[in-house]
Amino acid sequence: MVAGLRWSAVLFGGLFVGVAGGVGQEPDPERIPTIPNGVPAVLFPVQSTTPTPGGAWVGGMATDRETIELLNAELEFAFGEEEGAESWALAETVEYRLSRNPMIKVDPARLAYHGLLREPEPHSQIYEPLHTQLRQVAALFDARLVVLPLTVWYRGPTDEERAAAETAEDPARGRAVLLAAIIDVRRSAVLWHGTIEGDPAEATSRSALTTLALRVAGSLAPS
C-alpha cells in the first residue's frame, strides 16, 4: 500500500528523459514513481523510528536502534532480490564506501533529515547541509538519484480495517509505515515524498518490517 504521495511530474518526466533515454509517460499520481532499471540510485540507511503509543518498537525490537538495524537488513535483502536494483548502491555498500573515504565527513545513518519529516514546499530546493551530504555520497557512485528513508512507525488499524476484520472474524491489525523521499541531487529537488505501508501485522511481529521492506523494494525497483 502506498499513501500520502507527493511527486513532481515535471521533474520526474524531465529527469527520465535525460537519464533513461526518453521515457514517454508521466508518473501515475496513484502510485509511487518507479526508478527505471539501469538508472544508478543510492539507498541510504533508515534515519529514525517512533514507538507505538504503548511504547513498543515496531518489529518487537528492544530499542529504536535495533528497529532501524532490522529494517535496514530487511531492505538490504529485499532490494537484493530485485533485478531492477542491480544498479543501486544499497545502505551497506554506502557505509562501507564511506569508511574507505575518510575525507568525506558524512555519517549516512545520521543525516540532517529532520526538515524532510514534513512535506516540502513545491519547487523548493534541498536545504543545507543535507544537500551537500547527499551530493557527496551520490558522487561516489556516479548517481543522480537518492532514496532517503526518513522514519518508520506503526499505525493501528483504520475503522475500515476493523470492520473488515470483524466480518472475517479475524483480529484487526495495523501496518508498519515508512516515510521516504526520492531526491535528484543534481537539481537539489525532491521528486517524491510520501509513505509506503507493509502488510497487516502485529506491531511486535518481525513480519511488519519484512513486508514493509518487500513493498518498498517492489515499488521503487521492481524486477
Image (tube, helix red, strand yellow):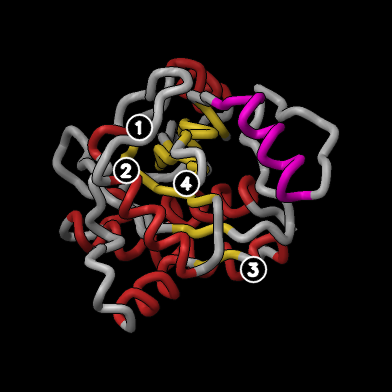
In 3D space, how far apart are the residues under numbered discs 1 and 2 (Cα atoms)?
A: 13 Å
Q: Nearer the viewer, mark 3 or mark 4?
A: 4
Q: Nearer the viewer, mark 4 or mark 1?
A: 4
For badge 2, the amino acid type reads Thr
Mark positioned earlier in the residue sequence (3 or 1): 3
In 3D space, how far apart are the residues under numbered discs 3 and 4 (Cα atoms)?
A: 26 Å
**For the magenta stretch, what is the residue range?**
7-20
Q: Nearer the viewer, mark 3 or mark 1?
A: 3
Where does the C terminus fall, quadrant-wise?
A: bottom right
For badge 3, the amino acid type reads Glu
Q: Is residue 78 visible?
A: no
- The percent coordinates of residue 121 (x first, y second) are 39, 19
Q: Is residue 14 magenta?
A: yes
Q: Label 1: which residue?
A: 155
Q: Nearer the viewer, mark 2 or mark 4?
A: 4
- Mark 1, Cα crowd under 10 Å, few <14 / some 14-19 / many 20+, is some
- The percent coordinates of residue 48 (x first, y second) are 25, 48
Question: What mark, if any, has residue 38 been given in the picture?
Answer: none
Kindly state the secondary structure of the residue where label 4 is placed: loop
Kindly state the secondary structure of the residue where label 2 is placed: strand
In 3D space, how far apart are the residues under numbered discs 4 and 1 (Cα atoms)?
A: 31 Å
**Residue drawn at (38%, 24%) of the image:** 120
Q: Is residue 159 magenta?
A: no
In 3D space, how far apart are the residues under numbered discs 3 and 1 (Cα atoms)?
A: 27 Å
- Mark 2, Cα crowd under 10 Å, few <14 / some 14-19 / many 20+, is some
Q: Label 2: which residue?
A: 151
Q: Is residue 4 visible?
A: yes
Question: What mark, if any, has residue 81 been given in the picture?
Answer: 3
